[in-house]
Image (cartoon, rainbow, N blue to C red):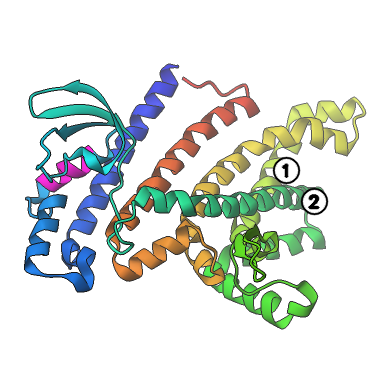
Amino acid sequence: MHYLLNKIFYSFLTLFGVVTVIFLLFSVLPGDPARMMLGQREDSAQLQIVKHKYGFDKPLYQQYIYYLNDLSPFSIHSTKSNDYTFLNADKYTYFRLLSLKNYSIVLKYPYLRTSFQKSGQKVSQIIAETLPNTAVLAVAAISLAFILGIILGIISAVFKNTIIDKGIAVFSTLGMSVPSFFSAILFAWLFGFVWHKYTNLQMTGSLYEVDDLGRGIYIQWKNLILPAIVLGIRPLAAVSQLTRGALLEELNKDYIKTAKAKGLSPYQIIKKHALKNALNPVVTAISGWFASLLAGAVFVEYIFNWNGLGKEIVSALNTLDLPVIMGSVLVIATMFLIINILVDFIYRWLDPRIRLS
């Protein structure tokens, strides 16, 4: 419990640092957020109203406090109906904890503000609509990398220094060195265009598609194949080499020699003894890669027209939709921290010698 509390505390400190850096970074970008929100409807009166409503007319430090207040689960809200500052409670659903003279302390979900470009749509709603698609893609990619990577790593370790081992090493090197956006273009062109009549795969497409006959929206699972393969190539290469190295190290230890002396077959030794102990570095790699896949799916989603969070980030960058960019980065950072905490407990399950203290 002490370890868990420490881990959560340091994760909050890290997240606080991420929030601060993101806010300061996007605060110095050129352009007026109020003008971005109004677009072609801009006039001086509306400009002043929007600036006052969202606190853009305040000093930078005060805007930062407003931003923290929006993100915090415990927030201060104005009870004045004509107060259009950041404290106005009309922006989100809340539960009032304490009422003061002009303000209330409330409990709420973190408020990521509203999009500059999508008619005031909440950033949380945009992320909620796109993140599941990215999660499906990331899970499919990491599952592919984990399963095939371990299998290739075992084969490579069993056939050490043979042509099979060297072939897998060449494949791993290529997988790690080729950028994902290049692989995405190559796979989309080859399997979705050149060999389309054999693969029946499309160059682009998302998880959900609209039926041409008017029967509504349906799930198109085959559109997941190419982006999942492209996104999973690099972690697959890393997992296969890590599995090979860790397994070879375990196979040279004394307890493996004892198992051999007892007459256990190589299959039994790997399955029941060596593999589980060799998985610790693999779990480390998988956890890091899974979190990075959520962020690294940006170009892959854009090339394959996969309607996920990555594609949404690219669109937001093109239109300077700062709240969407900032909210997406914060969500990805939060998920990265949560995954790191979970991985520490997986270590404990895989290797009882590790003590969480």
Amino acid type of the residue that numbered disc 1 sits on in the rendered structure: Leu
User: Would you call the spot at circle 1 few (<14 residues within 10 Å), some (14-19), or many (20 or more)?
Assistant: many
Residue nearer the viewer, 350 or 126:
126
Q: Which residue is the site of mark 2?
A: 155
Residue 189 placement: quadrant? bottom right
Residue nearer the viewer, 262 or 297:
297
Above or below: residue 248 compared with residue 7: below
Q: Residue at x 20, y 64 (%)?
A: 29
Q: Which residue is the site of mark 1?
A: 248
Cα separation between marks 1 and 2? 11 Å
Above or below: residue 108 compared with residue 303: above
Q: Residue at x 69, y 65 (%)?
A: 170
Marker count (numbered): 2
User: Would you call the spot at circle 2 few (<14 residues within 10 Å), some (14-19), or many (20 or more)?
Assistant: some
Under circle 2, the secondary element is: helix
- Spot occupied by residue 330 in the image (x, y as percentages of width and height): 35, 47
* Side of 250 relative to 293 (left or right): right
Above or below: residue 93 compared with residue 306: above
Mark 1 touches mark 2? (CB < 8 Å)? no
Residue 175 placement: quadrant? bottom right
Magenta-drawn segment = 62-69
